[in-house]
Image (spheres, grey):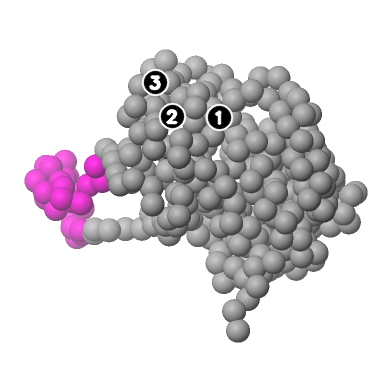
Amino acid sequence: MSANPTLEGRVVAVTGAGRGIGREIAILAASQGAAVVVNDYGGSVDGEGSDRGPAQEVVDAIKSAGGRAVANTDSVADPKGAERIVVTALDNFGKIDGLVNNAGILRDKIFHHMTEEDFNLVVDVHLRGSFYVARAAAPHFRKQGFGSMVHMTSTSALVGNIAQANYSAAKLGIAGLSRSIAIDMQKFGVRSNAIAPFAWSRLVGTMPEEAMQRNFDLAKMQAVSPAHIAPVVTFLLSDAASEINGQIFGVRKNEIFLMSQPRPIRQIHKSDGWGLGDLANVMLPAFKSSLVPLESSGDVFSWDAI
């Protein structure tokens, strides 16, 4: 008998849930029985300002449909704020069972124009923010003997995109973070997986023109709704996905990809060690055909979303 991917009786926190992908996840999770902490700082796409409105609007939509939800507007980039997201779940619903690390900002620039602030702010929200919230939830998951985390990575990191060194670094860090959480906490019944989503959002819409043209076909990207991401996330939060841990999925419209993770693909050995000439004359010819080309996401996912 197949498992039923319900979230009935579960409590889930979704960061960055006021708009886009996070909003769709929060609404679908609630429709499947979860009580949801809708976290959204309400800032601009580059991390400026704050606004309680987006989170509360999603809470109101969930409640009007008969679900349970509460708003939280803390910043995931603040360790104390991350703790308060989890405390919000405990105070309002008595526990926390699932976490979706979705909050993010963009500050895209060609690398030689990227500032320390551009780099640090993106890493703070995406990578450090994912760590802070996951770390706050982990002791509760461990104590109760189960829990599921889903973190948003990106093909900008797994494959590559132009003008996104800060975002790519943070998102590849998240892939490593998710895998490490899965390894460390599997014995406590805790699962951690990552998703690289393809969807039109206000973040994508702020990319520089050169990056947008190189990375995406704009018209086709706009046709890929954030709603396509939510079912996979909701499934991974459920007990029906109990066998899935430490994995990375790509989701694009009606397509789901199981993404590879770095493993050795070629090996050569020289018993007396490698000199510079050996590297040029032996290693390079042996590895040359297997070197990974400098592709972007658009090169690898070159067909139209299905």
From this view, report whether residue 115 is shown above or below residue 260.
Answer: above
> Which element type, helix, strand or loop, lies under badge 2?
loop
4 sits left or right of 276 in the view: right
Distance CA(mark 3)–CA(mark 2): 13 Å
Residue type at mark 3?
Answer: Glu
Tell me the element at label 1.
Answer: loop
* Furthest residue in direction left, as rendered: 281
Residue ID for mark 3: 209
Give x and y (percent) for residue 43.
68, 25
Name the image quarter holding residue 238.
bottom right
The residue carrying mark 2 is 164
Question: In the image, what residue occupies the spot 38% across and 26% down?
Answer: 211
> In front: 2, or 125?
2
Give, as a three-letter code, the residue at label 2. Gln
x then y, percent, for residue 220: 39, 37
Q: Are marks 1 and 2 in contact (CB under 8 Å)?
A: no
Figure label count? 3
Q: Nearer the viewer, residue 61 or 137?
A: 61
Distance of label 1 from label 2 (alpha carbons) = 16 Å
Name the N-terminal-most of marks 1 and 2: 2
Residue extent of the magenta highlight: 268-293
Q: Residue at x 73, y 32 (%)?
A: 54
Check disc 3: other Cα within 10 Å, few if <14, some if 14-19, many if 20+. Answer: few
Labelled disc at residue 202: 1
In the rendered view, tell whether residue 45 sits above or below residue 15: above
Q: CA distance from mark 3 to mark 1?
A: 14 Å
Q: Is the C-beta separation of discs 3 and 1 under 8 Å?
A: no
| Amino acid type, mark 1 | Arg
**Closer to us: 203 or 84:** 203
